[in-house]
Image (spheres, rainbow, N blue to C red):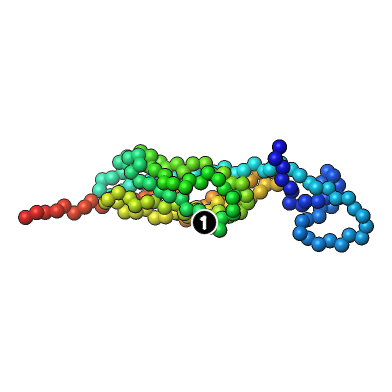
Amino acid sequence: MEMVEREHLWNTKADGTGIDYNVGENYTITEDIDLYAIWKKNPAPAELHVTGSKTLSGGNKTDKNITEGQFTFKVTADALNPENGVTDVPTGNISVKAGGAIDFGIWTFHKTGTYKFTISENQPPAGYTKADDIDMIVKVTYDNQNNVYTKSVTYSSDKGLEFHNVYVAPNPIVIE
């Protein structure tokens, strides 16, 4: 079983019910004491299934006109995200599915902190406007009572991860 030290590394009782002594703090000790390292299992990570959608309008286009791979997206992680705190974030292009569903996969968070990702549409096919980038903020906290990481997610768009494109039909060329 993989173990990790608890936030309060040392305690005066082996079962952890005594006085805690935190790492990095200074104490004045006036008599001999026994200190015990307190250990516990690694907390369960927080998993987040990241999905989005693509919508179309203009030129009689609707979501039903979206074909597999017609639009692609990329995820950019902020350089200030906690180091090695998240795994399974896609590093290549993610393709839209027929009908507009987008599946960015299940991301696994192993550390507390605030994570920022920008999800961008790559250059769309001719005739379509480019959808706006969407920032996704994931806040990961530690639930000490249940020994798990928890997460909350917010988006810069009030529609979550919905990417909208408008189709603008090209002007016909008239040859005289």
**Residue at the left extreme of this rendering:** 176
Q: Residue at x 93, y 57 (%)?
A: 31
In the image: residue 83, left or right of residue 55? right
88 or 57, which lies in front? 88
Q: Quadrant of residue 46?
A: top right
120 or 136, which lies in front? 120
Count the marks. 1
In the image: residue 51, left or right of residue 151? left
In the image: residue 64, left or right of residue 136? left
Expressed as whole percent of the image width and height from the top left, the position of residue 41 reads 71, 41
Residue 166 in sight here: no
Residue type at tag 1: Asp
Mark 1, other Cα within 10 Å: few <14 / some 14–19 / many ≥20: few
Residue 1 in sight here: yes
Q: Residue at x 62, y 43 (%)?
A: 45
Q: Residue at x 18, y 54 (%)?
A: 171
Expressed as whole percent of the image width and height from the top left, the position of residue 120 reads 42, 52
Expressed as whole percent of the image width and height from the top left, the position of residue 128 reads 30, 51
Looking at the rendered structure, the secondary structure element under dot 1 is loop
Query: Label 1 belongs to which residue?
Result: 78
In the image: residue 133, left or right of residue 112? left
20 or 168, which lies in front? 20
- Which quadrant would the N terminus be assigned to in this image? top right
Q: Residue at x 44, y 46 (%)?
A: 92
